[in-house]
Amino acid sequence: MPDLIRCPACNAKVPADAQVCRNCGNIIGELVCPKCGSKETEKLQGMRQAAYAVIFGSLNSFRAYHCRSCGKIFRPK
Ligand SMILES: [Zn+2]
Ligand SMILES: [Zn+2]
């Protein structure tokens, strides 16, 4: 059974190893690129976000991040 912590933003319970709160999308701890390990990540916004949401097929709950170092698009767990 995984440990649970509280999201500092909305107080929802989230797994201790989660990078993002599934309830409100708040980033918990530090988000690093899964490819190169860089912390220079930013949330995809606007049209780019919408385009990737179509590719991944989940418009509503979709949150993607972009690595500024290597350009990888990834979804935090
Ligand atoms: Zn939250
Ligand atoms: Zn990267």
Image (cartoon, grey):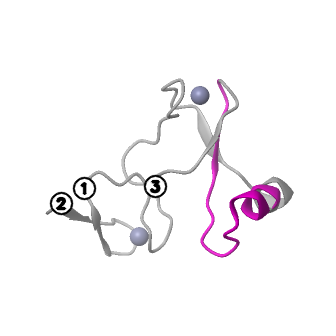
| Relative to 64, residue 60 above or below | below
Q: Which residue is mark 2?
A: 2
Q: CA distance from mark 2 to mark 1?
A: 7 Å
| Residue 46 appears left or right of 65 | right
Foreground residue, 59 or 25? 59
The image position of residue 65, as x and y in percent, is 62, 47
Identify the element where label 1 is drawn: loop
> What amino acid is found at the position of numbered circle 2 in the picture?
Pro
Q: Which residue appears at 48% of the width and 72% of the height?
A: 24
Q: Which residue is mark 3?
A: 27
User: First in sequence: mark 2 or mark 3?
Assistant: 2
Q: CA distance from mark 2 to mark 3?
A: 19 Å
Q: Is residue 66 magenta?
A: yes
Q: Nearer the viewer, mark 3 or mark 1?
A: 1
Q: Which residue is mark 1?
A: 16
Q: Which residue appears at 53% of the width and 23% of the height?
A: 36
For label 1, count other residues whose C-alpha is less than 10 Å away and answer few (under 14), some (14-19) or many (20+). Answer: some
Pointer 2 residue Cβ closer than 8 Å to ligand 1: no
| Magenta region | 51-69
Q: Nearer the viewer, mark 2 or mark 1?
A: 2
| Relative to 46, residue 70 above or below | above
Identify the element where label 3 is drawn: loop
For label 3, count other residues whose C-alpha is less than 10 Å away and answer few (under 14), some (14-19) or many (20+). Answer: some
Q: Are marks 2 and 3 in contact (CB under 8 Å)?
A: no
Q: CA distance from mark 3 to mark 1?
A: 12 Å
Q: Quadrant of residue 5 in the image?
A: bottom left
